[in-house]
Amino acid sequence: MNAGERAPDPQGARTPAEFLARLQELKDWSGLTYRELSARAEAVGDVLPRSTVANMLTRAGLPREELLAAFVRACGTPPGERETWLVVRKELATGGVRTVPGSMAAAAADRTAEGAAGTTAEPAVSRSGAGPMPDLDADVPAGAAAAPAARWAPGGSAHRGRIPRVLVAVVAVAGLGLAVSSVVALVRDGVERVSGPPVTPAAGPVLIRTLDAGLCLGEKPSDRSGQVYQRECAGADVPRYELMPLTGRDSGHWRLVTHHPEFGVGCTGVPGAAAKAAAPLHDSECGEQGRTESFRLEPFGTPVEGYRIRPGDSAQCITVTGDPRAPWARLETAACADDARGRRGQLFSFDRRD
């Protein structure tokens, strides 16, 4: 949300498809992730599930009135403009098509074309990277999507709110990682940490370890933003990470799939095209627009000292901010460094786990 920039206006929408395009513009204007929208709604007593918002923006039908009201409020629409969204929705629900004054029709057509390019042509995708987001609130057939998340979640099954209908099977590749070494648990300054030589990336469940501190990537259990930090490796289960190699035009890149005990399956990414520094590394729904969710895991040094995590093909590296040895230091993008001082906080290992 840019200061001084007005929220998108739905009054030019003539059809449900145009109205949904305006809703996507409103989300983009807010600058908030699905999880952040849900948290803002809950703070004022509204119910706005993350999966429901994702489905709302990719379906052809109009959203329910109460869902729309919660959504526009969470996006930060000024109070005087919220009623307009409900009025336009009611008119479309009644007649299917609205008449827009002549001076607005041409603008509406232009905005619809832009909305179609940004919303219809590139819908939110499942973790497989193909197809629109499925109905995440629908019942999941036995033995299908629920199994991967439930296999590790405390107490049995996990929340299904973010689990796609069809999960891509990720098979651990035997023998892919040749540099297997023992990992030693150390206690330093009262914090249990994992140390040892870097472990090569391999498809499947992993602990992602920062080599400078021997800490592991994770989130604060009470933090709903999805921000990724380095933390002690013992109990680093929020979320659990799974490496998925990408194919086709993204061959050579990886997706950092997450399994969260509350939010289900998601993807780790950075906002935007990953070309700027200080972009936060955070977990959210897979395929959310405006995020980079593919990474190069680049070996560094001869022999290999560790692996740099580079969003897309950018010159940025995922970096531990502040004190590179401090628990709960944030991870963000920063320029990849080749000198010994700059490398601190940019090298990682991928320890395999069950």
Image: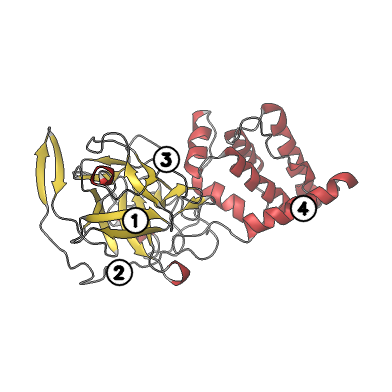
Do the residues bearing badges 4 and 1 touch, measured as CB atoms within 8 Å? no
Residue 126 percent location from the top left of the image: 48, 60
Q: Amino acid at mark 3?
A: Ala
Residue 85 percent location from the top left of the image: 71, 39
Do the residues bearing badges 2 and 1 touch, measured as CB atoms within 8 Å? no
Viewer-proximal residue among 26 and 303: 303
Q: Which residue is mark 1?
A: 149
Do the residues bearing badges 2 and 4 touch, measured as CB atoms within 8 Å? no
- Decide: is 233 above or below 135: above
Q: Is residue 232 left or right of residue 265?
A: left
Q: Secondary structure at mark 4?
A: helix
Q: Secondary structure at mark 1?
A: helix
Q: Amino acid at mark 4?
A: Asp
The coloring applied to the image is: secondary structure
Mark 1 closeness class: few <14, some 14–19, many ≥20 residues within 10 Å? many
The answer to which quarter of the image holds residue 301 is bottom left
| Residue at the image point whose x is 20% and y is 72% from the top | 175
Do the residues bearing badges 3 and 2 touch, measured as CB atoms within 8 Å? no
Q: Earlier in the sequence, mark 2 or mark 4?
A: 4
Q: Which residue is mark 2?
A: 171
Give the number of the mark in front: 3 or 4. Answer: 3
Residue 183 percent location from the top left of the image: 12, 53
Q: Secondary structure at mark 3?
A: loop
Q: Earlier in the sequence, mark 3 or mark 4?
A: 4
Q: Amino acid at mark 1?
A: Ala
What mark, if any, has residue 110 been given in the picture? 4
Q: Is residue 29 left or right of residue 323?
A: right
Mark 3 closeness class: few <14, some 14–19, many ≥20 residues within 10 Å? some
| Residue at the image point whose x is 42% and y is 52% from the top | 160
Q: Which residue is mark 3?
A: 278
Q: Amino acid at mark 2?
A: Val
